[in-house]
Amino acid sequence: MATLGYSFYPVHPGEVIKDEMEARNISQREFARQVDMSYTVLNELLNGKRSLSPTNALMFEAALDIPADALMNIQTKYNMQTARQDRKILMWLSKIPRVAAML
Protein backbone atom coordinates (compact mmCIF):
# COMPACT_ATOMS: atom_id res chain seq x y z
CA MET A 1 0.00 0.00 0.00
CA ALA A 2 1.14 3.52 -0.67
CA THR A 3 2.51 5.60 2.17
CA LEU A 4 0.32 8.61 1.33
CA GLY A 5 2.93 11.02 2.64
CA TYR A 6 3.28 9.43 6.06
CA SER A 7 6.60 9.50 7.90
CA PHE A 8 8.72 6.37 8.26
CA TYR A 9 7.30 5.59 11.70
CA PRO A 10 3.97 6.59 13.23
CA VAL A 11 4.05 9.79 15.30
CA HIS A 12 1.59 9.86 18.18
CA PRO A 13 0.07 13.27 19.02
CA GLY A 14 1.29 12.78 22.58
CA GLU A 15 4.86 13.19 21.31
CA VAL A 16 3.98 16.60 19.87
CA ILE A 17 2.23 17.70 23.06
CA LYS A 18 5.05 16.36 25.25
CA ASP A 19 7.65 18.24 23.19
CA GLU A 20 5.61 21.42 23.48
CA MET A 21 5.25 21.07 27.25
CA GLU A 22 8.99 20.43 27.62
CA ALA A 23 9.79 23.48 25.46
CA ARG A 24 7.58 25.57 27.75
CA ASN A 25 9.10 23.96 30.86
CA ILE A 26 5.72 22.69 32.08
CA SER A 27 5.80 19.56 34.24
CA GLN A 28 3.26 16.84 33.61
CA ARG A 29 2.08 16.88 37.22
CA GLU A 30 1.57 20.65 37.24
CA PHE A 31 -0.18 20.61 33.87
CA ALA A 32 -2.49 17.77 34.95
CA ARG A 33 -3.37 19.69 38.11
CA GLN A 34 -4.06 22.93 36.24
CA VAL A 35 -6.38 21.34 33.66
CA ASP A 36 -8.02 18.97 36.19
CA MET A 37 -6.82 15.83 34.43
CA SER A 38 -5.55 12.65 36.00
CA TYR A 39 -1.74 12.54 35.93
CA THR A 40 -1.91 8.90 34.85
CA VAL A 41 -4.18 9.69 31.90
CA LEU A 42 -1.95 12.59 30.83
CA ASN A 43 1.21 10.50 31.15
CA GLU A 44 -0.29 7.63 29.14
CA LEU A 45 -1.38 10.05 26.43
CA LEU A 46 2.00 11.76 26.24
CA ASN A 47 3.75 8.39 26.02
CA GLY A 48 1.52 7.07 23.24
CA LYS A 49 -0.27 4.50 25.39
CA ARG A 50 -3.65 6.21 25.08
CA SER A 51 -5.41 7.72 22.08
CA LEU A 52 -6.20 11.41 21.95
CA SER A 53 -9.93 12.10 22.16
CA PRO A 54 -11.60 15.14 20.59
CA THR A 55 -12.40 16.41 24.10
CA ASN A 56 -8.75 16.15 25.16
CA ALA A 57 -7.64 17.77 21.88
CA LEU A 58 -9.89 20.75 22.68
CA MET A 59 -8.47 20.90 26.20
CA PHE A 60 -4.88 21.00 24.84
CA GLU A 61 -5.95 23.68 22.38
CA ALA A 62 -7.35 25.80 25.23
CA ALA A 63 -4.34 25.27 27.49
CA LEU A 64 -1.44 25.24 25.02
CA ASP A 65 -2.89 26.93 21.93
CA ILE A 66 -2.16 23.89 19.75
CA PRO A 67 -5.02 23.58 17.23
CA ALA A 68 -7.28 20.67 18.19
CA ASP A 69 -7.93 19.72 14.57
CA ALA A 70 -4.18 19.45 13.92
CA LEU A 71 -3.80 17.14 16.91
CA MET A 72 -6.73 15.00 15.75
CA ASN A 73 -5.21 14.80 12.25
CA ILE A 74 -1.98 13.52 13.81
CA GLN A 75 -4.00 10.93 15.77
CA THR A 76 -5.79 9.81 12.60
CA LYS A 77 -2.50 9.44 10.71
CA TYR A 78 -1.04 7.52 13.65
CA ASN A 79 -4.04 5.18 13.69
CA MET A 80 -3.82 4.59 9.94
CA GLN A 81 -0.06 3.95 9.97
CA THR A 82 -0.39 1.59 12.91
CA ALA A 83 -3.20 -0.30 11.16
CA ARG A 84 -1.17 -0.50 7.92
CA GLN A 85 1.66 -2.16 9.87
CA ASP A 86 -0.59 -4.71 11.62
CA ARG A 87 0.04 -8.13 10.09
CA LYS A 88 -3.42 -9.43 11.00
CA ILE A 89 -5.09 -6.49 9.27
CA LEU A 90 -2.84 -6.85 6.22
CA MET A 91 -3.63 -10.56 5.96
CA TRP A 92 -7.36 -9.86 6.24
CA LEU A 93 -7.15 -7.09 3.61
CA SER A 94 -5.28 -9.33 1.19
CA LYS A 95 -8.27 -11.70 1.16
CA ILE A 96 -10.81 -9.03 0.23
CA PRO A 97 -11.68 -9.14 -3.49
CA ARG A 98 -11.77 -5.96 -5.52
CA VAL A 99 -15.37 -5.11 -6.31
CA ALA A 100 -14.89 -1.70 -7.87
CA ALA A 101 -15.90 -1.47 -11.52
CA MET A 102 -12.99 -1.46 -13.92
CA LEU A 103 -13.07 1.31 -16.52
Image (spheres, rainbow, N blue to C red):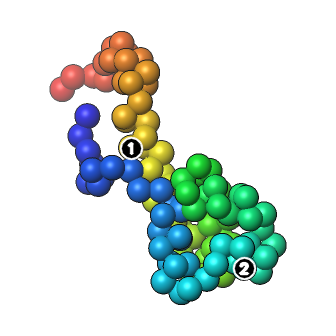
Q: Where in the figure is residue 89, as x and y percent of width and height?
A: 43, 25
Q: Nearer the viewer, residue 26 or 67?
A: 26
User: Mark 1 or mark 2, which is nearer the start of the sequence?
Assistant: 2
Q: Secondary structure at mark 1?
A: helix
Say few, some or many: other residues with alpha carbon within 10 Å of mark 1 (under 14 / 14 to 19 / 20 or more): some
Q: Nearer the viewer, residue 6 or 36?
A: 36
**Camera sees residue 73:** no
Indicate the quadrant where residue 57 lies: bottom right
Residue found 27% across the figure and 50% down from its top = 8
Residue at numbered disc 2: 30
Indicate the quadrant where residue 103 lies: top left
| 12 in relation to 20, above or below | above
Q: Tell me the kind of residue under disc 1.
A: Gln
| 62 in relation to 94, above or below | below
Residue at numbered disc 1: 81
Q: Where in the figure is residue 50, as x and y percent of width and height?
A: 62, 50
**Camera sees residue 21:** yes
Residue at the extreme bottom: 24
Residue found 43% across the figure and 40% down from its top = 82
Q: Is residue 12 left or right of residue 43?
A: left
